Image: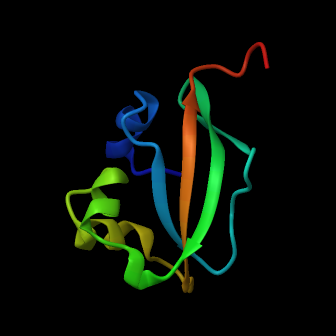
């Protein structure tokens, strides 16, 4: 799930990726996950090295910088870093 402050920007289409630190992937490509009146559809899932996470990726994910991103992305025992790319769909009716 997305931080409450990011949800409007996700639903507007401004944010189309998220960085997650997990033990194993928690989403799948093609998966649909409810958000507000619609859902996000995962279009790509990439595992990357922690060293590849930078300020640019943090900004693309809706954060001011790497430190702010990692404060949200890193929790629990996860060690693997994933970039989840997605599209917001306003409604799941018709498909």
User: Residue shown at 25%/66% (left/top)?
Assistant: 55
Q: Nearer the viewer, residue 84 or 24?
A: 84
Residue 47 lies, in percent from the top left, at 59, 73
Q: Quadrant of the C terminus?
A: top right
Residue 24 lies, in percent from the top left, at 69, 76
Q: Which quadrant of the structure image shows residue 15?
A: top left
Which residue occupies the extreme top position in the image? 94
Horizontally, residue 53 falls left or right of residue 29, namely left
User: Residue shown at 56%/36% (left/top)?
Assistant: 87
User: Residue shown at 43%/37% (left/top)?
Assistant: 10
Q: How is the image coloured?
A: rainbow
Horizontally, residue 78 falls left or right of residue 19, namely right
Residue 66 lies, in percent from the top left, at 26, 70
Q: Check the image and report above or below for 28 versus 75.
A: above
Q: Check the image and report above or below for 10 versus 31.
A: above
Horizontally, residue 43 falls left or right of residue 53, namely right
Which residue occupies the extreme left position in the image? 64
Q: Check the image and report above or below for 10 versus 81.
A: above
Which residue occupies the extreme right position in the image? 95
Residue 22 lies, in percent from the top left, at 59, 75
């Amino acid at each position: 799930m997305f931080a409450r402050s990011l949800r409007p920007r996700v639903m507007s289409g401004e944010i189309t990726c998220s960085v997650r630190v997990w033990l194993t992937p928690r989403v799948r490509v093609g998966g649909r996950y409810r958000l507000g009146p619609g859902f996000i559809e995962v279009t790509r899932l990439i595992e990357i090295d922690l060293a590849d996470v930078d300020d640019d990726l943090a900004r693309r994910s809706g954060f001011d910088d790497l430190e702010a991103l990692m404060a949200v992305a890193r929790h629990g025992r996860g060690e693997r870093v994933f970039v989840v790319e997605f599209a917001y769909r306003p409604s799941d009716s018709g498909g």
